[in-house]
Image (tube, rainbow, N blue to C red):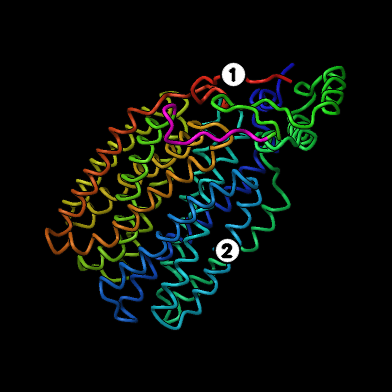
Amino acid sequence: MRTRTQRLDELPFTPRHRRMLGGAGIGWALDAMDVGLISFVMAALTVQWGLTPTENSLVGSIGFVGMAIGASVGGLLADKFGRRYVFALTLLVYGLATGAAALSTGLAMLIALRFVIGLGLGAELPVASTLISEFAPRKIRGRVVVGLEAFWALGWILAALIGYFIVPIGDDGWRWALAFGSVPAVHALVIRFGMPESVRFLESRGKHAEAEEVVRRFEDSAGPGFKPSARELRERDREGERTTTTSPVDAGSLAAPDGEETRESLWSRRYRGRTLALWVVWFGINFSYYGAFIWLPSLLVAQGFDLVKSFEYTLIITLAQLPGYAAAAWLIEVWGRRLTLAVFLSGSAVAAGLFGLADTPGTVIAAGMALSFFNLGAWGALYAIGPELYPTATRASGTGQAAAFGRLASIIAPLLVPLLLDGGGQVLVFAVFAIAFIIAAAAAFTLPELKGTALEDSGPASREPARRE
């Protein structure tokens, strides 16, 4: 008899999948909007509050301190209490904190609230990608997760539009911009009551009746051809009455007597190679992305462009993220995860080097758009490959801890940019970013290729065969 996860894997992309992706994607876009807004706020406060480069670095980096903690803790909580609840909680936390940041009366208050915002932002991303990967049909799982990540571009574009049209309107423009960031608090209610819990998580907790109900709703959405036969449903109902603790478990984990899976360390002999490579990729891509894009409006101002013109160029550069995601979403099911990730990281390295040499509006926009295209395509591939590397018991915490380690780079990079500017100007800044991309690309080549595999098969072989219903 097919397991519930096999039934999910064999489904087409249904209207229910589409609604779920849309709900998670809106949360993802709002996350990106919040992260993107701070770069415009930094540029505005440099003028209005007279912030020094060091103070600006603190504003930019403190949120990533919160994101590092949030990513690690959020993943652990999602593996313990469920993906949906933690996802909704993260939206609520950073939505309320962003709204409060709009009322900041000074630098200290803004920095404190940016830290709280970071806690919610950091926890949301690995949890959302894990939830979507556990529902996506096997044949297009990578493409669906890249589709989720593509919402990041929409959020960043929205941030650029708000930065371009709202921030410059007056002294309180940045406050109105941050006020828009309170929207996630409302969307948290949609996530909490409108999205199902992961079937894999429910089964790992012995909640078979609830897991069966979720699977049947997706099968109903797919149409009559994908519904189980009446005989199979009767057999499942009888099995559900007899079974209270057993469930099919992911490869790489054992069935525990209480219905929960035995957790294996991310640094065990089975997983340490992929964990190390994943952490290196996360560190390199965070270092270069946030170092470049958080500072981008301010760097353009430093080159002699006025505030409005720098925001305009940033908006144009940001638009190139969309075709980058589209290319990655197509290639990830053609080339595979590993090659797509490595190629886009390599392209990012070349683009970063060219941006460092750009000195005219045309070359700045061209190199910046190339950096957006390749860098965000790499992000899409990274979020697709991460959840495939671990079994259900450690999937969210595995991706969350990798993200947390990467956030350390996003803390360091904004602080390092002023020092690099003093030491060698923009050329040195983007040369360092290019080197980080190259190291990340090399690490990506060592990750396993898991295109077309079921999530249960993504870990090393289990010491015991997975139990069948």
> What residue would you read off at disc 2?
93
Q: Looking at this view, is 121 or 297 the one in front? A: 121
Above or below for 84 versus 439? below
**Where residue 315 appears, x then y in whole percent?**
38, 58
> In front here: 91 or 308?
91
Residue 160 image offset from top left, x and y in percent: 42, 61
Residue receiving disc 1: 464
Q: Position of residue 166 (x, y in %)?
A: 46, 72
Q: Is residue 401 above or below residue 10?
A: below
The answer to whether residue 246 shows anywhere in this view is: yes
Of residues 421 and 71, the one nearer the viewer is 71
Q: Which mark is residue 398?
A: none
Rendered-image quadrant of the C terminus: top right
Work out how far the residue at label 1 is from the one at label 2, CA to CA, in angstroms. 41 Å
- The stretch in magenta equals 260-270
Q: State which mark lies toward you, 1 or 2.
A: 1
Whether residue 331 is visible to the viewer of this picture, yes or no, is no
